[in-house]
Amino acid sequence: MNSITVKYRTKTHKLLAYEAMFRRILKEYWLNDSIVSAYKREKAGYDGERNVDYKLSTYPHKNLFIFQGLRLANPPFHFQIDTLLLTKKFICILEIKNKKGTFKYDSKQQQLTQEINGETKSFKDPILQAEAQKAHLVSWMENKAKYNIPIETLVVVAFPSTIIENVREDPDVYKKIIHNESLHQHLDRLNNNFTEEQFTKADLRNLCKTLLHEDTALRTDLLQKHHLTERHLIKGIPCERCQHYPMKRLYKKWQCPNCYSTSFKAHQRVILDYFLLHGPTITNKECREILQIDSPRTAHTLLNSMHLQHDGRNKGRKYYAPYMSDFPQNSSFPHINSSIFEGPLFF
Ligand SMILES: [Zn+2]
């Protein structure tokens, strides 16, 4: 029997917001290096995590529960775990690294350096990072769940082409920093190390429930981060075929005044992108502005048709963004030339 995935990974708010930004930003700002490289970094992290998700999904172990990404509060901090594994005998935190090239770890200096394309970069000690997550989780469990169970950590290098060099040939490091390819063997090793079951099935089920309940996605304000304002963004709905904007509202559909192509649902993505870039709520007035329409009645109909949760009445009514996991995961950039994402990748 294979493991059970309790929480599936979806794109982070940050990654979805970058994708929204590329759909909404005016053409003259596409080639902003800091935006493109921040997007590529976020995307590489997601791709690396997905590689590990795939490897784990084929691990034959019953009663192994997988959380593909968690963010929990340990006041005054929040801590983020790339992947959390629960078994009856132990818990394991995976800290996933998407670095490419040569990955040199010096356990005496507690330093990680990456060599790629003739450049050397240094990074935080990933073993210490994983230990910090563990310390947070221990304290979270003491407060929330009152469980006592061994917690292990593994730093998992996601891409098979990355060379790991254990500079001091430290035997502990071989057990702490591993390739995704050897993840199954290391999980077997941990499983054999622990003989006693600390959790009952009911404990596991309860902990899974609490973790799911306490998991909160991080929101990143990308407009603020990159010093962008309304004047950098497209107004209205762009036409998917010719990129002209805004599309005009006809009876029950949108039409491009330039190429005359029509769409029934073109507003949906624009409203979802608004949530990602501007905040978790939208009013009728804000909706009219982003769709470039005058009629409050039309905005009302469009917002209601998306089945968003709402509260308040009339002009004060606010519509709420869907859950992060309900946002569309496909990254379509019909308006931009995808070659802006090419070029050297230094991960
Ligand atoms: Zn058009």
Image (cartoon, helix red, strand yellow):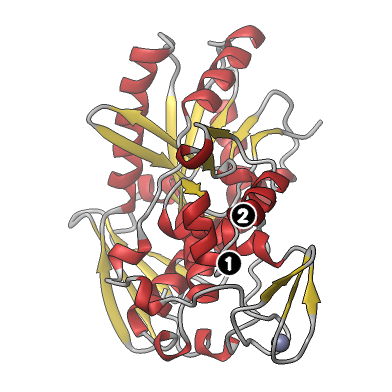
Picture layout, residue 338 above or below residue 5: below
Q: Which residue is mark 1?
A: 293
Displayed-image quarter of ligand 1: bottom right
Q: Residues within 10 Å of mark 1 (few under 14, many from 20)?
A: some
Which mark, by number, is residue 299?
Answer: 2
Residue sitting at x 40%, y 48%: 219
Is the shortest distance between ligand 1 and the CB of mark 1 under 8 Å? no
Secondary structure at numbered mark 1: loop
The amino acid type found where label 2 is placed reads Ala
The location of residue 41, given as percent across then percent down, is 43, 69
> Is the residue under label 2 in contact with that under label 1 (CB below 8 Å)?
yes
Residue 178 shows in this picture: no
- Residue in the foreground of this view, choosing between 191 and 215: 215
> Which residue in the rendered view is the most extreme toward the left?
109
For this view, does 258 lie left or right of residue 170?
right
The location of residue 302, given as percent across then percent down, is 68, 53
Residue sitting at x 35%, y 65%: 223
Picture layout, residue 236 above or below residue 97: below
